[in-house]
Image (cartoon, rainbow, N blue to C red):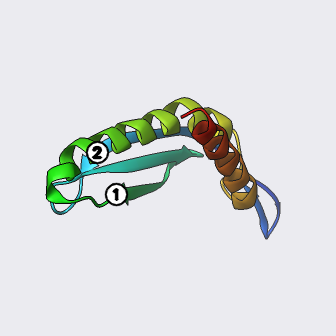
Amino acid sequence: MEPEVRNKLDLAIEIRDVYAREILDFAGNPAIEVEVLAGGEIIGKASMAGKNYSKKEQTEKQQVHIEEKIELLNSQIAPEIIGENVFEQRKIDSNIYGIRRRWRTFQ
């Protein structure tokens, strides 16, 4: 599918899917990877490290933190940004920040 081009600087590519999953970072610690599919291919992947804690607290807290964030990404953020134009970053950021604010109030 060819992206819709309205003029040379106005390109529209729709986000088709967003999927977050747990990975291990370079040190073997849990981290999050988010894959964004847009147009006919994967547009990007991003990895986010978990929070740093002392060695004793690290495994339990980091695992809970990672699981909560993956749940938030897959169940609430992904549906809000699927269908958006990947180049409308301010609109996408606004949606994500609004979801994060609502999510924090229910914790």
Direction from residue 25 to residue 5 in the image, left or right: right
Tell me residue 16's x, y (percent): 59, 38
- Residues 45 and 5: in front is 45
Kind of residue indicated by mark 1? Lys
Which quadrant holds the N terminus? top right
The numbered disc on residue 51 is 1
- Front one among 41 and 67: 67
x%, y% of residue 36?
Answer: 51, 47
Between 76 and 58, which is closer to the camera in this rendering? 58
Is 2 rendered above or below residue 21?
A: below
Which residue is found at the position 33% from the left and 55% from the top? 50
Left or right: 21, with 18 as reference point: left
Residue type at tag 2: Lys
Identify the residue at image location x=53%, y=29%: 75
Residue at numbered disc 2: 61
Name of the residue lying farthest toward the bottom: 9
Q: Tell me if residue 76 comes above or below residue 91 in the rendering.
A: above
Badge 1 or badge 2: first in the primary sequence: 1
* Mark 2 Cα shell of 10 Å, populated few (<14), some (14-19), many (≥20): some
Name the secondary structure under disc 1.
loop
Q: Give the x, y percent position of residue 51.
A: 34, 57
> Which residue is depicted at the point 30% across and 42% down?
22
> Element at badge 2?
helix
How would you rate the neighbour count of disc 1 (Cα within 10 Å): few for under 14, some for 14-19, many for 20 or more?
A: few
Residue 57: x and y, percent?
Answer: 21, 50
Whether tag 1 and tag 2 are in contact, CB under 8 A, the answer is yes
